[in-house]
Image: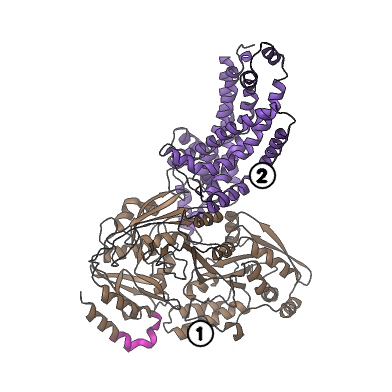
Chain colours: A purple, B brown
Amino acid sequence: MLFKALGKIAQTFVVLFVVSVASFGLLKLAPGDPIQIMLGSEFSQASYDSLRAELGLDQPFLVQYANWAIQFVQGNWGTSYVARAEIFTYAFKEALPVTLTLASFSLLFAILVGVPLGVLSAIKKDTIFDAGSAVLALTGTAFPSFLLGILLIWFFAVKLQIFPVMGYVSPWENFWLGIYHMILPGLTLSTYFIAMITRLTRATLIEVLEQPYIAAARARGEPNWRVVWVHGVRNIAMPLVTILGLQLGVLLQGTVLTETVFNLPGVGQMLTSAVLGREYLVVQAGVMMTAVLFIGVNLLVDLSYPFLDPRLRTSK
Amino acid sequence: MKPIDHKKVLAERLSARFGRRTVLKGLGAGLLTAATTGAPSVVRAQQSGHIKIASIKVIDTLDPHFTGFLSSIQIINNIHNGLLKIVYDGKNVTFEPDLAESWDIEDEKVHVFKLREGVMFHDGTPCDAEAVKFSLLRVKEGEPKSPHAWKLELLETIEIVDPLTIKLTFSQPYAFLPVALNGSTGRAGTIVSPAAVQKYGADYGRNPVGTGPFKFVSWKENDAIELEANPDYFEPGLPKLERATFVLMNEASTALAALFSGQIDGMTDCPMQLVDQVEAFPNANLYGEIEGNYTFVGMNCKRSPFDDINLRRAVAWALDRDTLVQQAYFGRAQKAYTPISPPMTEFFDPDIATSGRGQWFDLEKAKSFRAKAANQGEIEAVYLMAERGPVGTRVAQTVAPMLAEIGIKAKLELVEPATWVKRRNASDFDLYDFEWVADLDPDETLYPEFKSDGAWNFGGWVNTDFDDLCAQAQVELDPAARSTLYNKAEDLLMDEAGIAIMAHMPIYKVFSTKVKGFQYIPADLVNLHTVSIG
């Protein structure tokens, strides 16, 4: 089991390397010149050249990549061209916590709503409740989060004025105010996941409830709630964790739109403005952070299987 | 300091030369201010209130000498002052002394500025003649080169007469000077703290230190720029606010929702498509008028097919400006006949529509020019467009069917903004649309854009008569004569259809009704000096 885990970790590093080279290269190939954008519409060739040299953009691609990679690993992410901001502080200490808060809040919310809804649908299979939750789930998956966000803003923040339109307050500094500001963006981002988790929980649980050990539990005379919530729900953990790990990409993608609509200073907004402004180093940092997050979470998912399913604990 | 004596001396000088000096008309009004407020403020302002304003456009830097964005100037202007400032009384735009207490003209090329006494930068260093010299030199010949250096190209020597007096000598009389020396669209005349520039170097734009009503506090990326009142500000009783926050946003509709719900108090820019909503909302005030700008369809005169003057003329007469105003500009803009725009009150002809000057929609005329064009077949032209500017791709989409009427098939190429800039600057297009904004003087509206080797002349239209007229106008101080020269110059541009002119746009700001005392200036400024919040 340990050997397997080490293998997975090694794989992770290879993937990270490929991601870093690819994103570094793609951005260089994209049209648009960072120096021209930095200097604005009026500049001399001399200032163009000196800036180019200062930023090391006159070096060959491989040298640029190697320099960047060595510095990056050491936590020295450089200074952004245009913003003149320390990228490590900006990306890692300021933007990342916002996105992580939003993503984890949404995910937690989605699980808290989605799992019970799915369980109820499974128990009340083929009733009006089940059909209703199916419609709700379908709507949730189909509704564009951008539009949903704007609708929520106009209804809850402008008309009813019970939630703020925008802004971010760190829950670590002011817990309740932070949560308060997270509700509308969290709801926007989690709609898709609530729907997905509901459907997944329902389908898996229906299957699980037909297993012999459930029949055995019932035969032992265990009460119905115990059969469903302990023996049944425990067994949906594995497919749920797997799907959530894989869907993390969708979640991170969703944060970009949600952050834009609700004006949260997270990684999504950072990446959007950095891509438009050709802030190479910021895009790099953002892509690497999301890649590490995505790959890291999936590694954790892989490593968590033996804990979720005792049958996997013995290595073959 | 003897403000009254000074005023007398200058008034005599002025009356002797009044006819030739009205271009500097801000002077009289400015002196009045100087006479009443000559000494640094004794009465300290009582500041209160915290205003939050959404800024939905790019802020590149808060360094006045390096920014290329008006959205940055809006904030910079609250932190810094210029030697002169722009004043608007609802009808006329004038230039008045700001950091300068007086402005004396020894002769046409020699200008003497006397500075206010006791003005300090936010870092506690004095704003004296040395600091002014430092700032002007930083623009003129600093390294890296300021994009505004051309505005001080004619400045020959800077002499410090005494610690509060500075004498500027120009190689030629320079009519553009009032614009160049103010802290707004001129940017070149904004005075920065030499100590801060030395301390922060290239990072000055993130740590600006000026003399303005507000001090810079912090700039959090994609989040907010915070300013706080400068209690030692030199204009008595100002500023009124204690704090000001510019909330950095990408999404204008979210900003509007935040304004309606009271979470923010204003927007530095209200896109034309949201104006209807603002007008229907009782608790917001809209500020905005047609500003010093013009929009146009640019044609590449350097290559086929638009190196053909008849084809360009056909385009110029084929654009239905009424439809453009309605569809592309939400009915908010004003048809343009020539580049010189309404706020340039000394140069703009209010009756231009009936004057017979410029370009307008006349399909018959367009077709007759088209019939004279070298290429009589269907012409396919690359129209470069991007989701940029005030209305994105709407202009291109409205223009394309109009061009089809005269047998030009516009191939609309949608690229991202960075690519658009690169291709425009490399003249890699047949057609594109653009706007030059926030100009207060015909010089900046015509000369750098269309002179033969001008850095912004992306269409490459060449006419040496035009160059000569603009160069003459630059050194002509009599406004009537200057106006004639510029009219001749723009008539050349319109006649040869270097561009097809479209519209003058209104630029809007919106504030909640709680916000009082905002003074609108038609140069896209958001000066918070006199603003208070109830």
Residue B68 visible: no
- Judged from this view, the residue extending furthest toward the right is B377
Q: Tell me residue A141's x, y (percent).
A: 67, 40
Judge by depth and name the residue closer to the eye, B261 or A60. B261
Q: Tell me residue A46's x, y (percent).
A: 46, 57
Q: Say if the magenta span includes residue B251.
A: no
Residue A259 visible: yes
Quadrant hosting residue B3: bottom left
| CA distance for labels 1 and 2 | 60 Å
Question: From the viewer's perspective, is residue B227 above or below residue B119?
Answer: above
Q: Tell me residue B366's x, y (percent).
A: 72, 77
Helix, strand or loop at disc 1?
helix
Helix, strand or loop at disc 2?
loop
Question: From the viewer's perspective, is residue B107 above or below residue A89?
Answer: below
Instruction: Tell me which chain the residue with mark 1 is part of.
Output: B
Q: Which residue is mark 2?
A: A143
Query: Residue B526: which numbered mark, if any?
Result: none
Disc 1 marks a residue whose amino acid type is: Thr
Q: Which residues are magenta?
A: B12-23
Judge by depth and name the residue closer to the eye, B284 or B221. B284
Q: Which residue is mark 1?
A: B484
